[in-house]
Image (cartoon, grey):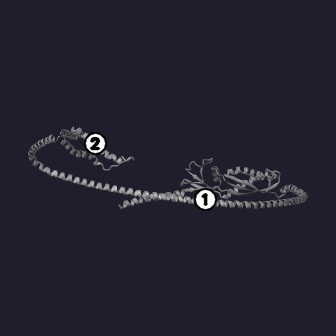
Amino acid sequence: MGEFGLDILVIPMIVLGVIIVLGMAFWARYKTVGPDKAMIVTGSYLGNKNVHTDESGRKIKIIRGGGAFILPIFQQAEFVSLLSHKLDVTTPEVYTEQGVPVMADGVAIIKIGGSVEDVATAAEQFLSKPTEALRQEAQEVLEGHLRAILGMMTVEEVYRNRDKFAQEVQGSAAKDLRKMGLQIVSFTIKDIRDKNGYLEALGKPRIAAVKRDADVAEAEAVRDTRIQKAKASEEGQKAELLRDTSIAEATKEKELKVASYKKDQDTAIAEADQAYHIQEARSQQQVTEEQMKVALVKKEKEIEIEEKEILRREKQYDAEVKKKADADRYAVEQAAEADKAKRMKEADALKYKIEAEAKANAEQKRLDGLAIAEAEKAKGTAEAEVVRLKGLAEAEAKEKLAEAFEKFGQAAVLDIIVKMLPELAGRIAEPLKSIDKLTIVDTGHGEGAARVSNYVTSLMATAPEMLKNVSGIDLEKLVKQLTRQPEHHIEQKSEELNVG
C-alpha cells in the first residue's frame, strides 16, 4: 500500500517536472523583437508569412515588432537594427561644368528600408558586419554621386538652387543604396565653397548693386525727409492757427453754454421750489388719506373680529346643545341596550330552564318507559273502564248540557262562546310574541303607533267571521236575538199593565 501511494505521488511530480522543463525551454527559445529592430530567422520550417526567397531559392524569415518560437537545431535567429544613421558627406575640389573647382558639404540621413526585400538585402550584406562598415559604404556611395552631380552643373546653378542640387544627388544615389537595402530619409547641402574666390567675385556685382541701391535709397530718404519736414512745419502752423480759432470758438460756446446753463439752473431752482411745495401738499394729502385708510382698516378689523366672536359663540352654543343632545341620545341608547341585555339574559335563563325541564321530562319519560311494559296489561283494563266511565260522563254531561240549553236556551250558548273568546284572542295574537324588536316609522301624521293597535283590533274583528266559518254559529245574529228578547218581555209587561 505504501509503495503504491508513493508511485501515485511520483507520477504527478514527473509530469510537473516535464511541464516545467518544456515551459523553460519554450521561454528560452521564444524570441521577441521591438519596433526598432528586425529578427532574421534562418533554417527550416519557416512557413510562408514574411518569408523572402532570393534568386537561388534560399529563404529567410523577417519578423518586426513581434515574436516567434525558434526551433532548436532547425532554426537560428539574429537581429539587425532599423535605426537611422547620420552621414557627413564632403568632397574635395570637383570641377564643375564650367571647369571651376568647388567643394561641397552635405548631411544625409539613411536607414535600412522597411520592406521585407530591403531588410533581406541589408541582412545579406551587413548582418555580420559592424555598423561602421554600413556607414562607410553608404557615405562613399553618396560622395561619389555628389561629385558626379556637381560635375554636371554650373557654379551658378549649384549656388543659387541648392534644393535642386540636393534632389539630384538624392535621386541618383537612392538607386544604388536601394541595392544595398538602404533608403535616404533626407539629404541637404550645408556649404559650397572654392579656393579661387570665384563665388566671392560672383557676388561682388550683386554686392555693388546692393550698395548702389542703398546709396540711392539713402539720398531719396534724405530728400523725402526734408520734404516731409517742410510739409510737417506748414501743417503745424496751420494746425496752430486752427487750434487758436478752435479755442476762441470753444471759449465763446463755453460762455454761451454757461449762461444758458445758469438760466436753466435758475429756472430749475424756481420750478423745484414750486414743485417742492406742491409735492409737500400732495404728501400731506397722501398722509391724511393713509391715516383714514388705516382707521378704516382698523374699524373693518374690529368689525371682522366682532363677527368672528359672534360666530364663535354661535358655534360654541351649537356645540353645547349638540353635546347635550348626544349625551341624552347616548343615555337613551345605553338604557335601551341595558334593557335589551336584561331581556336577553331573562330569555337565556328561560331557555335554560325550558331546556332543563325538557331534559328532566325526557329522563322521566325514559324512567316511565321502563314501567310501561308492566302497566300495559293493567292499562288495557283501565282504558276499558275509563272508556266506559267517560261514555257515561259524556252522556251525563250532554244530558245536563241539553237540559241547560232547554232551560237557558241561546243564553247558555252565548255564555260558552264568550268564555272561549279570550282563548281565541290569545291564539290570534300569539304570533306577535315572536317579535323581538318593533320599529315604528311615523311620517309626521301621528299614525305610526296607532297602526299597531289597529292591526290587533282588525285581527279581533275577524274573530266572529272565523267562528261562523268554523262552527256555523253566527255570533252577531245570536247577540241581536238575545238583545231583542228583553225588549219583547218589557212590551208584554207593559201591555199587561195597560190591560189591568
Amino acid of disc 2: Ala
Q: Is residue 153 left or right of residue 131?
A: right
Horizontal side, residue 46 vs residue 84: left or right: left
Of residue 210 and residue 139, the one placed in the foreground of this image is: 210
Above/below status of 407 relative to 350: above
Give the percent coordinates (x, y) of residue 58: 60, 49
Q: Secondary structure at mark 1?
A: helix
Which numbered tag is attached to residue 461?
2
Pick the quarter of the image with the C terminus.
Answer: top left
Can residue 293 be seen here? The reply is yes
Q: Is residue 428 above or below residue 213?
A: above
Q: Residues within 10 Å of mark 2 (few under 14, many from 20)?
A: few
CB under 8 Å between discs 1 and 2: no
Q: Which residue is label 1 attached to? A: 296
The quadrant the N terminus occupies is bottom left
Nearer to the camera, 152 or 354: 354
Residue 49, image x, y percentages? 58, 48
130 left or right, relative to 267: left
Which residue is outermost to the front?
500
Q: Secondary structure at mark 2?
A: helix
Distance, label 1 to label 2, CA atoms, is 80 Å
Q: Position of residue 313 (x, y in %)?
A: 49, 59
